[in-house]
């Protein structure tokens, strides 16, 4: 009788063989990983032992070097007279840093870094603090808003202007308690002075009196018209002047640089003005015909004496001889003392001025002609 083999038996055999192979692979890999881990652990232990022996050797060498150098140690950072050098040397022999801990405990500050800071020189500390403060101020300025920066810039500009003005001031050689009173001065006295300041109408000059004298722009030159005092002088210049008038009660002193002849004419004219009745500006109208005498010639024209309360001004372009002297200065065709016929072109009551012209206005009626038959 034949035995029948089922088809399920080879399949079960194959599965068993496959399972055995997998188990053998797992065991092999586990053993390999276990052996590799043991080897790595052994290598790590050997490396730590080598480092331990090597570190012990280095520490031994360092200790020997410290023992040999204890006699040559020098304090580099501390300038304190109370610094304990013996305690410092003894602490260097101790490897646990007992000295640093003692210093920190005495100063109530923890750590070695603070001990090093307190061992620095006071000058070095001050310099480090100053640099830190400057850096802090700079960083604070960078974080400021724009309006604060503008305000700070304006304040610094005003401060620089005040310093510049203070530096430009002229130093006075004579103190105020040793100055000459105005009552001791007389008209025409020659004096040397120093220009203190300039204004639009003149210059203030220190002549050694109790108050500064005023040199008006009209009293600075006889040859040309001075628009501003900076054309002929500047603060700090030494000048030669004469006393024109004084008023001790009001503390006023007027100076001049004009010659004695011009001053004599002004004095004479002043006396004449006091004796004669001058024409008021209210009595003058535009196109009024007048005769006058040229008193002073400038770069722009001439001042004409009309017998009025003020002198009239005649521009050089309003002179009849101007077309014949184009490009020339007014003093070539106008001279002091010349008599001229002029007409009033404008009267300024507020500024107390009279503007003149030497050309006959065209709107005036001409001379009447009569024919005789």
Image (cartoon, rainbow, N blue to C red):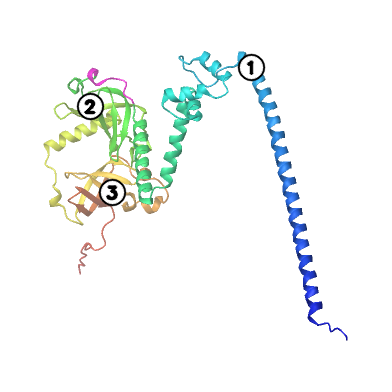
Identify the disc placed on residue 211.
Answer: 2
- Give neighbour class at mark 2: few <14, some 14-19, many 20+ (Cα, 10 Å): some
Picture quadrant of residue 268: top left
> Which residue has dot 1 on it?
67
Magenta-drawn segment: 171-178
Q: Which of 68 and 292 is in front in this view?
A: 68
Residue 285 figure quarter: bottom left
Q: Which mark is first along the chain, 3 or 1?
A: 1
Q: Please report the residue visible at 55 percent of the width from the left and 20 percent of the height from the top.
A: 76
Using a 10 Å C-alpha cutoff, classify the residue at mark 3 as few (fewer than 14 neighbours), some (14 to 19) or many (20 or more): many
Q: Residue 236: which disc? A: none
State whether residue 281 is above or below residue 252: below
Q: Where is residue 139 in the image (x, y as percent from the top left)?
A: 44, 43
Instruction: Tell me the residue that label 3 is attached to.
Output: 314
**What whole-number distance in Å separates the C-alpha atoms at marks 1 and 3?**
107 Å
Q: Main secondary structure of the magenta part?
A: loop
Q: Which of marks 2 and 1 is in front?
A: 1
Whether residue 175 appears in magenta in the rendering, the answer is yes
Dot 3 falls on a residue whose secondary structure is strand
Q: How crowded is mark 1: few (under 14 residues within 10 Å), some or many (20 or more)?
A: few
Is the N terminus in the top left, top right, bottom left or bottom right quadrant?
bottom right
Q: Earlier in the sequence, mark 2 or mark 3?
A: 2
Q: Residue sitting at 15 percent across and 49 percent down?
A: 281
Residue mark closest to the camera, 2 vs 3: 2
Q: From the viewer's perspective, is 237 left or right of 268?
A: right
How far across and down, in percent of the image, does residue 60 sit?
A: 67, 23
Gap in Å between the C-alphas at discs 2 and 1?
84 Å
At numbered mark 2, what does the secondary structure look like: helix, strand or loop?
Answer: loop
Q: Do the residues labelled 2 and 3 touch (CB within 8 Å)?
A: no
């Amino acid at each position: 009788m034949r035995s029948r083999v089922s088809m399920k038996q080879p399949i079960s055999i194959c599965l068993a063989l496959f399972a055995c192979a997998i188990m053998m692979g797992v065991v092999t890999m586990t053993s390999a990983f276990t052996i590799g881990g043991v080897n790595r652990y052994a290598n790590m232990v050997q490396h730590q032992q080598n480092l331990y022996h090597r570190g012990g050797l280095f520490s031994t060498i360092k200790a020997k070097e410290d023992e040999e150098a204890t006699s040559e140690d020098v304090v580099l950072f501390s300038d304190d007279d109370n610094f304990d050098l013996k305690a410092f040397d003894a602490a260097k022999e101790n490897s646990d840093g007992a000295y640093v801990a003692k210093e920190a405990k005495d100063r109530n500050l923890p750590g070695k870094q603070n001990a090093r800071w307190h061992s620095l020189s006071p000058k070095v500390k001050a310099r480090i603090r100053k640099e830190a403060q400057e850096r802090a101020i700079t960083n604070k300025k960078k974080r400021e808003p724009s309006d604060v920066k503008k305000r700070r810039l304006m304040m610094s500009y005003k401060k620089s202007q005040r310093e510049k003005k203070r530096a430009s001031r002229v130093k006075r050689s004579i103190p105020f308690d040793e100055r000459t009173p105005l009552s001791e001065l007389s008209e025409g006295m020659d004096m040397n002075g120093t220009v203190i300041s300039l204004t639009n109408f003149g210059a203030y000059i220190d002549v050694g009196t109790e108050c500064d004298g005023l040199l008006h722009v009209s009293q600075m030159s006889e040859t040309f018209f001075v628009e501003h005092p900076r054309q002929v002088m500047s603060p700090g210049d030494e000048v030669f002047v004469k006393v024109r008038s004084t008023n001790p009660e009001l503390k006023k002193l007027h100076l001049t640089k004009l010659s004695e002849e011009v001053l004599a004419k002004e004095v004479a004219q002043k006396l004449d003005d006091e004796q004669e009745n001058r024409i008021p500006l209210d009595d003058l109208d535009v196109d009024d015909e007048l005769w006058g005498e040229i008193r002073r010639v400038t770069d722009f024209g001439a001042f004409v004496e009309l017998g009025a309360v003020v002198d009239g001004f005649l521009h050089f372009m309003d002179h009849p001889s101007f077309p014949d002297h184009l490009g020339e200065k007014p003093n070539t065709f106008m001279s002091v003392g010349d008599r001229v016929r002029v007409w009033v072109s404008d009267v300024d009551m507020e500024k107390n001025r009279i503007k003149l012209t030497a050309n006959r206005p065209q709107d005036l009626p001409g001379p009447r002609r009569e024919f005789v038959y």
